[in-house]
Image: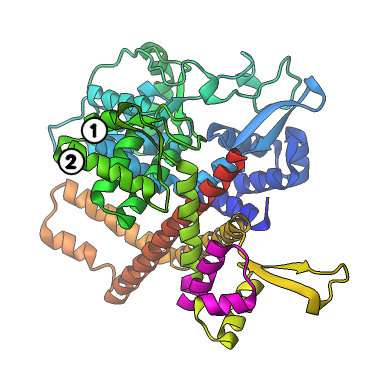
Amino acid sequence: MTAQEVRLCGLLLQEHFGNVVEKVGTHLIRSGVLTLRALAHETKLPLDLVKKSLCVLVQHGMCTFGAGRRGPAGPVEYRINCEHIFHMLRYPRYIYTAKSLYGDTGELIVEEILQRGQMTMSSTVKTVADRLTHNMPEGQSMDYSEVVSAFSQLVETHFLQRCPPLASAGSSSSGAVDTPLPVATQPTEPESNPDCYKLPYINLTGQGKRRRSSEGGEAEQRAAKKARTDNSECGDDGIYWQVNFQRFHLHFRDQAIISAVSCKLDQTSSEIVRTMLRMSEVTTPAHAAFTQALSANEIFRALQSSYNIARPNLDQYLSLLVDDPMEFVGKTGDSGGGMYVVNLHRALANLARATLESVVQERFGSRSARIFRLLLRKRHLEQKQVEDFAMIPAKEAKDMLYTLLSENLVQLQEIPKTPDYAPSRTFYLYTVNQLPTARLLLQHCYKTVCNLIERRLYETKENKRLLEKSQRIEAILASLQATGAEAAQLTEVEEMITVPERQQLESLRHHINKLDSSENQVDETIFLLESYINSTKTSR
């Protein structure tokens, strides 16, 4: 773990779970593996607080536990899962994707499970139905069956999966206690469970209940206690569900490929690639280099009729995609009118390359980007060759090369003619290694996200009093509107915020929205670079 990754994990844990969980999580990241008592001793926190922090991390899949170095008879050891902590940065994107695919119901299902880490199907359905009913006009309510249908669709498309079962039947009760266990308690991988995507039969009928405005935290606690007893009555007690982050990432990857094809060629080509990816989205393994091979006949039958693509035109488009230098689509055979695949690893490499070129262009200008692209294409060039090929004056080319070299975006390789490495008898070749450069840029992105989060937290803290006042007035207005207050009363409450304060609030919200938008944009770059780096690991 680099310093920037540890810093980002700490900020995300602090923002979502508070200072205590952040301290426990950050210490686990730095220490690697620790027992409960060692963790409490080193962090100097009360044992009870450390237990609760570990429960929170385990509940959200950010901490794993199992038998330690002494074997099954020894104390349980805890290990942090940094990859799942980074996923918190992408929570808004997961929720927005669920909304775009499955509407408001899908959005709330994913939001509730992300917020709580893992939930049973019955409690999720009831909570979502109640929330939807609360936002409906008076007299209308959301039926449980509609929420169950959306939940089933999310499971069928693998966006939700069952939580992995524990290896020991007695481990769930002693997961957060530092006592000897008879067997290892490390949960297995979700995909290894044969019932990973099997929906339980739940006995659930009815409609969502409207929450009264007077009900507060006590009502929520009562509902939580009631949900524990209702789970056994519904028939899914002990069957918990979690968000399948890997499936969401595959969807993001596919959307990035489709968008790239649309920009490079045209909309029709992107729809053909979309159809190929959709046909093999569930059958293709997560780290596969290619999708499942599909015949031209299968692709033609799967295309939506609204596209109006004739069979001869489809063959022409497929040939165009195969011959394109980006190599997003490849041909593997001639049966069935031709067998075609989407080259996933090649597509990710091209997307990462385009990202690197864009960064160089934005930071150092179009001429430096021209040199960078030239080195990516030609691999190794001397300074004189760079000047000639890029058609840039010698002095400017030299300055640009040295600037890129100082930023570690370009590397210099020495090839001596003689063993003494004499400068007059040595070739100095400039080159770009795409993988190390992508790793370097990824660290810069982590640093950028950390700075954005810190700035957003600072802005919120500096204007805390004004934000609390605004929230109180909004709550008063909402309660007055619910009771049918007159317009004069509402106006009087609204005037409790002065004009300068209102202007300050608007400015603050504008800045916060810009920071949030910047975080999402940087996260898209992080996702592309991480996907490319992971694909190079699996392709070796």
Look at the image and tell me in which quarter the C terminus lies. Answer: top right
Q: Are marks 1 and 2 in contact (CB under 8 Å)?
A: yes
Where is residue 243 drawn, in percent x and y? Answer: 44, 33
Residue 327 marker: none
Where is residue 93 drawn, in percent x and y? Answer: 39, 47
Residue 309 marker: 2
* SS label for mark 1: helix
The kind of secondary structure the magenta stretch mainly shows is helix
Q: Is residue 311 above or below residue 199?
A: below
The amino acid type found where label 2 is placed reads: Ile
The residue lying at 66 percent from left, 74 percent from top is 406
Residue 274 found in image quarter: top left
The residue lying at 48 percent from left, 17 percent from top is 238
Q: Is residue 534 visible?
A: yes
Per the rendered image, the range of residues in magenta is 361-389
Residue 177 found in image quarter: top right
Q: Is residue 498 left or right of residue 117?
A: left
Residue 300 marker: 1
The residue lying at 73 percent from left, 33 percent from top is 36
Q: Is residue 135 visible?
A: no
Q: Is residue 522 above or below residue 335?
A: below
